[in-house]
Image: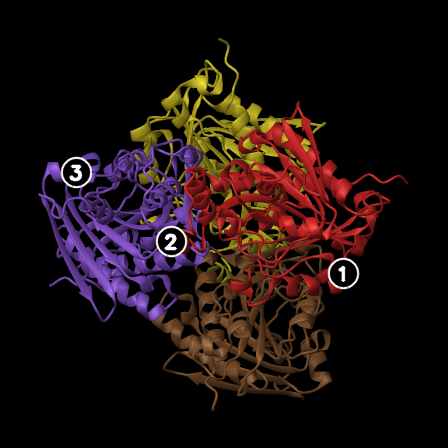
Chain colours: A brown, B yellow, C purple, D red
């Protein structure tokens, strides 16, 4: 039976859809959809209120905001600026105490050497980092009286560092004491139709087994001691998932097919993934720059 | 019927296998298999002798040598040296006039920015290039009396250059007049079981539609005017092919399934593709360096 | 005597200044200076009219436009857009037949692996390349009736390719027949005060011995058969030149000092050269994109 | 007077030489020189025993081992293996408790984007990292009963992270509790004759103001709580230093010359720095791999 095959998706939206097929409404899950016609962006807000609902969806309790915009795939610079601004608005709403000055650490997860997994490192490359300047010269260096302290790190992957990402980030958090952590990661989706054109923002952080590179350790409020906002874009689909979905669509009632073991550790990605990652990274770093530059009432 | 779905593979070995399922022997195709037990390398030599056989297999007439070695996937440096030497021997046999001094241009196809497509550029990075030194200072600069002139180029992909790869390579060949061209490219296989552990060497060059990046234009003796040896490693499998194969294995008699159009322009690759590409590139550049350093009788 | 030490500069402006010290006006050299107060850009136009003047200045006959803007060093995005537009205007004036549709090949000289020499490759990375799309789908693909065909190449350095840059570019020009070639290169200046804040545009192309990487072969109208516009930014100063200048300033009358041989093949560069190169590359690629997007009267 | 100009060098050997000019022997400083004729490597051991001597030399108390080998500049792979082994022997002697199993964190300082400063990150890229595998699967995964746990990090530069390198490394050390830290950094030398052909190993760690990128914060036993071994290669010379030295050699008695302020934040580097850095990085990572693979008596 299809249900016995664990659906691999980092998107709460997809997790919910796969349950929805059988039951229309899920207790403990709240959903709002908004469509911005001008910018052709669909914003869906999924809130998982109860532990029970969390178990059903296989996602932790919390808020998941999803922006879907088919035009994200296109190389239109002006359009991407619009998306960055929409993203910045959503980000501003989910970051705790966003109306007050604070210290923010941005963490770029993933492997710089693997195109589809390089979203996090690339976002960090374009960030406007201020912490060191403010600590040394004060906000006057930027002609401001109120300003967020922004720092960033690319921890690298476990195969290269020999350390869990969580060990590195926890160490840096304890030394530099940010008020909030923003984590960027490339995600896996269930379906190719969301690949590279969807951004998910959540206040639940990063959980074991998510992401393109299967980062094992959690980056959450529990593990780090400060709120963790995660921003992700699905850049790959698990190869086994795609095959399974195809078999199901063919309405063939199957046991877990043999081919799947061959597909362990493989994923499906698009051929123009390099240009796509560059565009998406810039879009997200702009959104973070806008959000963290926040105007404060004096 | 399965045959109506065009099988997408750059490996002559796989093209032959897919025909073999129905007919045991194919007229006009000669096959030799050798297994080197010590190094656990299987060397298969497929020669397509007739136009008819070429049409049946969807591959041009010529010689295709395939080295399969499961251990290629492992990070064992000494073992890779063995494979480089086996590869060098095969390469030496297929390069015309290899026993004489000549001028060789090595072309690294593919996109340096896309991990799975960066094999060609990475191989070229490790080559021992000699042409400019010999032309300026003579072979005496290397304390040799006979020596090949080696040059190399990474033409880049059409989306970046606005030019066909063939236009660039043809221009360079006409200016620098090499005796033979060696082209390196990342390939697509039909099955994940050959991915990253198979090297194909052929004297038929590169044909439209092959490779990860779908290079459209031919690099062949006909187009360039000199013999073209192509070296390729399958680093991806077409996503649509994998789904199709799974559906067939499930013995579901299908028309071309709907899911396939969604999978256009997508491919399946492995998660550790970055480390794999580095190892494979080094293995191939070493093989070329050994081959082209060839000892000549004085 | 100081004059016997050959002054190493790729800037016509500096070549002229070093002569000017002794003689106020040089026969055969025309100079116009303009200062744009709003954008704080000084535009100097040096035209070398006669062979004699060319010999005196050690620069070929032709037009050299220099933009100097101290703020180029700063990370102000809006300001860089202004400079790009000023640059585009100057570029439009020096490109022959700029008011007509034509085919333009942009060549990024230099070594991508050496920060100070990576200007050319980086500029090419940000170009809007159109040739392949127009040849395949027509200008309609861009909703235009008139449009330039833009192509680009990064030939690589001789140590990596074994070929002269000129051989590669000549081959590509003969195959693809552009109407004009634009070459980008990192330059050497005589003084650190012009480093990274000066752009030189010239219609004389590239001459042996110029550039950070000492590209030996000429890229000129004579060698390529089409007009060659060169755009350069001094990103280094020759180490020997700096020492020599210091010795002269100390009014010490010296023979060529011993230290100079130690400094062969060394150059002076700034510590934040990576961020600087990124900014300058983007500024120049934007200028070229604006220029080549040129509105044509229908 | 020349002495008033602070000599900028990260090499204890050079610091000592500059004092030696006036006084032959320095109290509290012990020097041993050894020349390995076969490999043409000169090994100098400078031990600074007293605070007074430390003040005189401007270097902290401790041991400084310098390997000088002109052939390091050459692209001879076999020779580099010899140097790696010599280096590994010296490293084994200076790492505390090297005969016992321990946990080692290797830190690659510097800026991956600036060629001359990328030594540290490049060394880390080639390391054999084992900690995560041993913690998960035990030493049995490597068929060993005793084995060092190796981890590594590239913290990035302050301009990119907004954090002091020391904050990041301290956090990681506190989380992962290594027994010893090895830090790799590109250094500044006083003279170009030591550039790229000298390796310094010291047990004094990294001190403010050293390195190509002027890392401000200390990485020492005092700051991190565990022994810190630093490995460095001079890849640049401060531009102001070179000019000053030239002026002195010209026996011109000068006040601090004007030119020096222009040269602030500038350095001299060699033109083939990219190939040089690749070779040196590989040589050092091999030396660390050999050292940390250490055979332990059972």
| CB-based contact (under 8 Å), mark 3 and mark 2 | no
Front residue of this view, candidates C195 and D155: C195
Rendering quarter of residue D27: top right
- Badges 3 and 2, same chain: no
CA separation in Å, label 3 and label 2: 29 Å
Q: Is residue D36 above or below residue D277?
A: above
Which chain letter matches label 1? D
Q: Is residue D260 left or right of residue B126?
A: left
Residue at the extreme bottom of the image, as rendered? A298
Which circle, 3 or 2, is nearer the viewer? Answer: 2
The circle on residue C56 is 3
Front residue of this view, candidates B292 and D158: D158
CA separation in Å, label 2 and label 1: 43 Å
The circle on residue D291 is none
- The residue singled out by tag 1 in the image is D225
Q: Is residue C6 left or right of residue D9?
A: left
């Amino acid at each position: 039976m299809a249900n016995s095959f664990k659906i691999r998706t980092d998107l709460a939206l997809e997790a919910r859809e796969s349950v929805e097929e059988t039951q229309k409404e899920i207790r403990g899950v709240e959903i709002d959809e908004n469509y911005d016609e001008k910018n052709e962006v669909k914003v869906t807000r999924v809130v998982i209120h109860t532990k029970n609902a969390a178990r059903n969806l296989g996602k932790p309790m919390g808020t998941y905001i999803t922006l879907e915009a088919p035009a994200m795939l296109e190389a239109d610079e002006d359009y991407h600026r619009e998306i960055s601004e929409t993203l910045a608005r959503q980000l501003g709403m989910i970051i705790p105490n966003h109306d007050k000055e604070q210290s923010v650490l941005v963490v770029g997860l993933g492997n710089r050497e693997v195109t589809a997994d390089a979203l996090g490192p690339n976002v960090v490359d374009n960030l406007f980092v201020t912490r060191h300047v403010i600590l040394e010269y004060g906000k006057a260096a930027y002609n401001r009286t109120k300003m967020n302290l922004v720092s960033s790190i690319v921890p690298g992957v476990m195969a290269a560092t020999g350390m869990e990402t969580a060990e590195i980030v926890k160490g840096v958090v304890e030394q530099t004491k940010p008020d909030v952590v923003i984590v960027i990661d490339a995600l896996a989706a269930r379906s190719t139709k969301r690949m590279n054109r969807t951004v998910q923002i959540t206040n639940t952080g990063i959980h074991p087994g998510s992401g393109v590179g299967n980062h094992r350790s959690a980056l959450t409020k529990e593990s780090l001691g400060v709120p963790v906002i995660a921003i992700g874009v699905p850049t790959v689909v698990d190869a086994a998932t795609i095959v399974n979905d195809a078999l199901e669509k063919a309405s063939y009632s199957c046991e877990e097919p043999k081919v799947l073991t061959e597909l362990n550790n493989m994923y499906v990605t698009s051929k123009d993934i390099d240009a796509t990652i560059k565009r998406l990274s810039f879009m997200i770093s702009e959104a973070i720059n806008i959000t963290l530059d926040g105007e404060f009432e004096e």
